[in-house]
Image: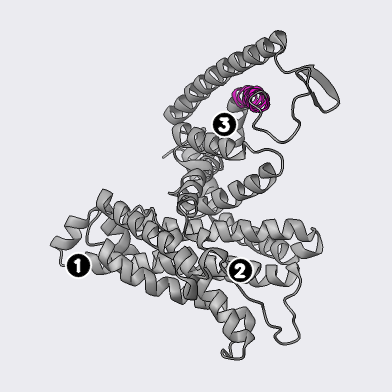
Amino acid sequence: MTVTDLNIEQTNRTRARKAPGIGLLLMIGVTVLLFTLPLFISPVFLNYAIKMMVAGLFALAFNLLWSHARLLSFGHAAYYAIGAFAVIHALTLSEHGGLAVPTPLIPIVGLLAGALAGLVVGYLATIRGGTYFAMITLAVGELLSSIAPKWQAVFGGESGLSSMRMPWAGITFGTVGEVYIVVLIWCLLGLLLLRWFPATPLGQIAVAVGDNEKRLQFLGYRTHAVKSVVFSLSAAVSGLAGGLIAFSMESASFELFGGANSAMPVMHAFLGGADVFLGPLVGGMGLTLFAELASNATRLWLLYMGAIFVTVVMFAPEGLAGIISRHTKLNLASWRLLVADYAMFLCACVGLVLSSVWMAEIGNRLMGTSPIAKLAPDGTLTLFDWTFSATSKPIWSAAIALLVLCLFGVIVATKRAKVTWFAMNNSGDSLQ
């Protein structure tokens, strides 16, 4: 081993010793920031923050099942909704004096209800695996979705159920800030539970089941029981997430059982990165914020969400957190090699997004399906104090030309970056 090799090894060891300290400080800083957030932002954005945290926790709960046992559930909205209705019933009991539980602890009812429902359904669904398992979970979700609007006593029929948070220990829970703190604490507890699970013997066996179930069965493990428990734990945290959203909104409706709610954690997990622990959290919080902001501006926000999901899954299957994790391992010299390609890529992406959005929005208005900024009788449209003809051929030609040019730029920048990454991987010493 040369002196240079010794220096590199010593540097890596020093970084490895510093990394936990930096990570701990970052974690403490983020936690302090989250608890002091009500002091800095308006109630509207606090509501956004509550929805983002719940969406992130729900995606993490779904991903527990996928990342460990490799079981893909298409009906997790069932446990989310069961948790929500359980909390509403608990709040109603508390309101009438039938439940002597402190108000901040009531969301645990959603966790218990989700765990119980998950244990029953999980025991039956995990008898099979793969596509059969996915279809069983989808069928259970659709079954409950069809029953909920008709079962007035439990789910309130089509109008749903509502209740009120009772004061406790001088706290009224009447402001968004107080509710935000309760939701934040429960989300952090749920996050710690999901982070702790892989370190347990059961968590490690669950990972082994996902890798090779036949081998575990040959060694004498009861893999069906393991999958049932993991399913129940995933459903429990999903129920907690549903309970938190019901706790914050003081209502729940049968729409929580809908297929869209089952699709969301799947999208969030794979968009954020299913193989990185915090990936689903990143995907859930990011996409929820995008949905809240974009839905106020355009009716095409679902189209844009779908386009983002398809693009990430096709071209970055490791997800956003996977990309971030890979780039944190680069040193300064590697960044210098990549900066020109990445700058070209980002500029081309901006142009590609702007031209695509412009064409989609103008096309939407030409079809007369947008209630916002309708066309004038003479076919003109005014956006940002600029009046132009929506059917102007030069403007459409310029938009299409920009789209093609930027698409070409994205392809070229991607190829150049791949060549640079290939060269760095072969040299080895450019990475940390």
Residue 299 appears at what percent x and percent y? Answer: 64, 38
Label 2 CA crowd tier, 10 Å (few <14, some 14–19, many 20+): many
Q: Which mark is residue 334?
A: 3
Which residue appears farthest toward the right when viewing the image?
385
Residue 172 sits above or below residue 261 on the image: below
Q: Quadrant of the N terminus?
A: top left
* Residue 221 circle label: 1
Residue 154 versus residue 390 in the image, above or below: below
Dominant secondary-structure state across the stretch colored magenta: helix
Single out the mark in the foreground, 3 or 1: 1
SS at mark 3 in the image? helix
Alpha-carbon span between mark 3 and mark 1: 46 Å
Tell whether position 269 is magenta: no
Q: Is residue 347 magenta?
A: yes
**Residues rendered magenta in the picture:** 340-365
Reading the image, the residue beneath label 2 is 251
Give the foreground label among 3 and 2.
2
- Which of marks 2 and 3 precedes in the sequence? 2
Determine if residue 201 is in view: no
Picture mark count = 3
Which residue occupies the foreground of this view, 85 or 152?
Answer: 152
**Rendered residue at 61%/68% (across/down):** 251
- Separation of disc 1 and disc 2 at Cα? 43 Å
Q: Going 57% across and 31% down the picture, which residue do you hit?
A: 334
Seen in the picture, residue 33 relative to 268 is either above or below; the reply is below
- Look at label 1 and name its amino acid: Tyr
